[in-house]
Amino acid sequence: HRFWRYEGPAVDNVRRRLADLAPGLHPNFNAARYDAGGRITLHNDARSWTLEPHEVTNTDYPVGTQVFRKVAVICYLTQDWCKDYGGCLVDNLQRGPQQIVPEFNSLVCFLVPREHWVTEVQPVAPLRYTIFGW
């Protein structure tokens, strides 16, 4: 994987709004920036973990709760992206890979686990920004 991840307070408002889409769950959202050469190799997003005190966001999920990723979410934030820039999500479907070109202000969601990757961002591409999570 090669991209920049940001987990700081500058994206807290967006994280809260995305979390409001599924109240009662335990979302985990981050911001990402892909520059030239940025990519993500084949993976399926499957993961589980036990909540630590700093991860508790509501009383439905106390410290020590085991949580699992169930739905992956990608919100595209870069305008005028084109396939030639790379940085496309490739969904590794049973009938063969399907490439999804990032579209500004759109949301892609899929059930986890699901094999996918992100193609390499080309040197001519602008910076590619997303909010992603589970």
Image (spheres, rainbow, N blue to C red):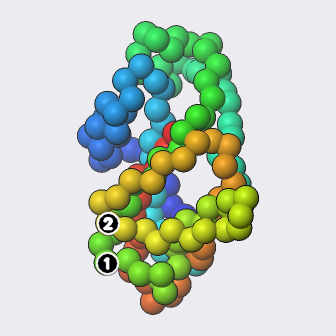
Disc 2 residue type? Answer: Phe
Q: Nearer the viewer, residue 50 or 104?
A: 104
Which picture quadrant has residue 52? top right
Q: Residue at x 45, y 89 (%)?
A: 124
| Numbered mark located on residue 25 in the image | none
| Numbered mark located on residue 80 in the image | 1
Q: Residue at x 53, y 79 (%)?
A: 86
Q: Residues within 10 Å of mark 2 (few under 14, many from 20)?
A: some
Quadrant in which the N terminus is drawn: bottom right
Residue 2 visible somewhere in the drawing: no
Name the spot of residue 39 as percent of width and height, x first. 60, 69
Circles 1 and 2: CB distance less than 8 Å? yes
Q: Residue at x 57, y 71 (%)?
A: 99
Name the spot of residue 41 as percent of width and height, x first. 69, 64
| Mark 2 lies on residue | 104
The number of numbered discs placed on residues in the rendered structure image is 2
Name the spot of residue 29 as percent of width and height, x first. 45, 42
Give the left or right position of residue 105, taking residue 82 as reference: left
Q: Nearer the viewer, residue 92 or 117?
A: 92
